[in-house]
Image: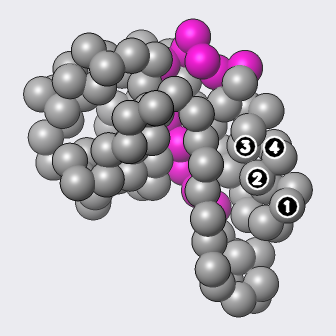
Amino acid sequence: MNCFYIFGCVGLLFTSSSAWAKQLELHVYGPGGPLPAMKMAAQAFSKSHQIKVLVEAGPIEKWRDQAMANGDLIYSGSENMMTSYLQGLPDLVDVKTIIPA
């Protein structure tokens, strides 16, 4: 499973039917530092798109296995942290989806 990565903040756009969106859960993983902002962004996105966003944060060891199983999006606190993710999770992050802020 490949996961999308957005550096710094979350900005997502879904162009799908509302029936599909109501069934979707978006699984988001990343470090604890940006967690308050990520949770606020997740709540705003959930409210406006009727998509449940589940954010799990902390040291990579805490969420690595979960992200490998169901990760949709990974965020990072810095560019060097993303480089570490690329090295530690080579099968998870699709490099073409990295969007630096």
Give the residue at mark 3: 42
* Residue 98 picture location, percent across and down: 32, 44
Please give the range of residues in magenta: 25-36
Tell me if 79 is positioned left or right of 17 in this view. left
Q: Quadrant of residue 52?
A: bottom right
The amino acid marked with disc number 1 is Ser
Q: Nearer the viewer, residue 56 or 15?
A: 15
Answer left or right for 29 relative to 96: right
CA gap, disc 1 to disc 4? 9 Å
Q: Secondary structure at mark 2?
A: helix
Q: What amino acid does circle 2 point to? A: Phe
Answer yes or no: is residue 69 visible.
no
Residue type (three-letter) at the residue carrying disc 3: Ala
Q: Secondary structure at mark 4?
A: helix
Q: Which residue is mark 2?
A: 45
Q: Disc 2 and disc 1: Cα gap in Å?
A: 5 Å
- Residue 31 in magenta stretch: yes
**Residue 81 vertical placement versus 97 (above, below):** above
Q: Nearer the viewer, residue 59 or 17?
A: 17
Q: Are marks 4 and 3 in contact (CB under 8 Å)?
A: yes
* Mark 4 touches mark 2? (CB < 8 Å): yes
The first of marks 1 and 4 along the sequence is 4
Whole-angstrom CA distance, mark 2 to mark 3, is: 5 Å
Q: Position of residue 69 (x, y in %)?
A: 35, 51
Q: Is residue 38 visible?
A: yes
Q: Residue at x 66, y 31 (%)?
A: 38
- Is the C-beta separation of discs 2 and 3 under 8 Å? yes
Q: Which residue is mark 4?
A: 43
**Can you identify the residue that label 1 sits on?**
48
Q: How many C-alpha atoms fall within 10 Å of the one at disc 2: few (<14), some, or many (≥20)?
A: some
Task: Give the residue type that dot 4 points to.
Answer: Gln
Q: Nearer the viewer, mark 1 or mark 4?
A: 1
